[in-house]
Amino acid sequence: TIIESAGGVLSPSSSSPLNNTTDIAGSSSSSSFWGWSTQADLYSSLNIPVVFVGDGKLGGISVTLASLEALWSRGYQVDAIVFIEGADDGDNGESIQFGKGNTEALREYMTMQNNGQQHRLVDNDSIICLPSLPPMPIPLDEWYEDNREEFRRL
């Protein structure tokens, strides 16, 4: 079973059992509400393993750690973490890559956490960084093929 979510693990889920409307954004009606079930809460009863896609951009390590903590606190087993290389332009217009740095920072964090037996991944090899996606509208076929071995490891 594969469930792909978007917006983040603590984003409200439009599939919440309490959500009684599809018109939330910009609604002035006091009866419109999300029904507030986060995606992490909504799927927790399924007891499914997680391959988490972390944020490969500047500041992404914080968002990734907060998301992982939210998943772990709800009992999820995170089997792998994947960063996709993101690029930000520096002051001089050069592209700065953060995905690999975020990967290494998370590996170091997990090593420290695993010493305390808090949250275990299979091993640090389950935290990987993939290259940037090709720009739209280029198909992803070649990108997938170039990264086939990384996907097999997961």
Image: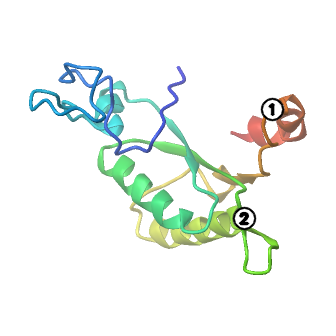
Give me the residue at 80% from left, 74% from top. Answer: 93
Q: Nearer the viewer, residue 39 or 138?
A: 138
- Indicate left or right for 53 with 71 as reference: right
- Residue 137's tag is 1
The amino acid beneath tag 1 is Pro
Percent coordinates x, y for residue 42 in the rendering: 30, 30
Give me the residue at 32% from left, 22% from top. Answer: 15
- Mark nearest the camera among 1 and 2 is 1
The residue under label 2 is: 100
Q: Nearer the viewer, residue 148 or 93?
A: 93
Q: Relative to residue 81, is residue 27 depicted above or below?
A: above
The amino acid beneath tag 2 is Lys
Q: Relative to residue 71, is residue 61 depicted above or below?
A: below
Give me the residue at 24% from left, 34% from top. Answer: 37
Percent coordinates x, y for residue 124 in the rendering: 64, 59
Disc 1 on helix, strand or loop? loop
Percent coordinates x, y for residue 105 in the rendering: 60, 71
Q: Quadrant of residue 41?
A: top left
Residue farthest along the left direction in this orientation? 30
